[in-house]
Image: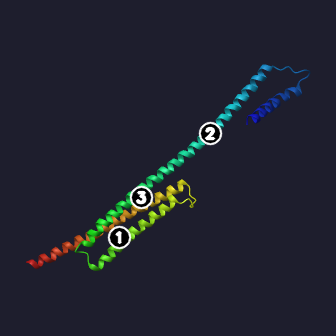
Amino acid sequence: MEQKVKKLVLTIVFVISLPGLIRSQGMPVYDNTNFISLAKQLIESAKQTTQLLKTVDFLKQQKENIEKVNNVIKQLKAVKELYKNNQRLYEMVRGDLREILNSPYIKANEVEQVSKSFNAIIENSIESLDYIDQILSSNNLKMTDGERAAILKQKELESKEMVAEIENKTRRYQEIIAFRKMQDIINNRGTNY
């Protein structure tokens, strides 16, 4: 690189001084101190340019490293959020489903429907976790860290939707139970008088 710069400097100096040689009559007179000073400045400038190029390459590499770390952090946050959502999902299903199924106001023919409804969400959650495990552990999938982070974020949103769906189903069944309980109280009050 330095040799190329020196050749370039000498070529530039030669081209600059060439018109003066062609037009002059007689012996040209040069001020060697200016010429040497110019050559030194050009060489120093070339060295600085080389250093700047090295610095730019270093900064690009550091930027790439920071982006990689940032993507890994996004993946970790998404996985943590997914775990938290799935943990919440399991706890809600375990507690709420038991409470709903143990209610005397849920009819025998509804028990299977309620169980299937909750189990479908849990199975979807398990499939989602298996897919995430494949994404994170398999090197066969040709993905960048950014693509993995995007998929994990999408799965995180899906897990939040599953939690919301469980909450809605639980609330709906609890409202049905509350309505049937109130209906039972009203019907039994009328027969007690």
Which residue is located at x 47 percent, y 54 percent? 75
* Residue type for callout 3: Leu
Instruction: Judge by depth and name the residue closer to the eye, 131 or 12.
Output: 131
Describe the element under mark 2 as helix, strand or loop: helix
Describe the element under mark 3 as helix, strand or loop: helix
- Judged left or right of residue 191, residue 164 is right
Instruction: Judge by depth and name the residue closer to the eye, 150 or 191.
Output: 150
How many neighbours does mark 2 have within 10 angstroms: few (below 14), some (14-19), or many (20 or more)? Answer: few
Label 2 – label 3 distance at C-alpha: 39 Å
Placement of 38 over or under 129, stated as above or below = above
Q: Quadrant of residue 46?
A: top right
Which residue is located at x 33 percent, y 76 percent? 113
Q: Position of residue 25 (x, y in %)?
A: 91, 22
Q: Which residue is mark 3?
A: 82
Placement of 55 over or under 44, stated as above or below = below
- Model colouring: rainbow
Q: Which residue is mark 1?
A: 118
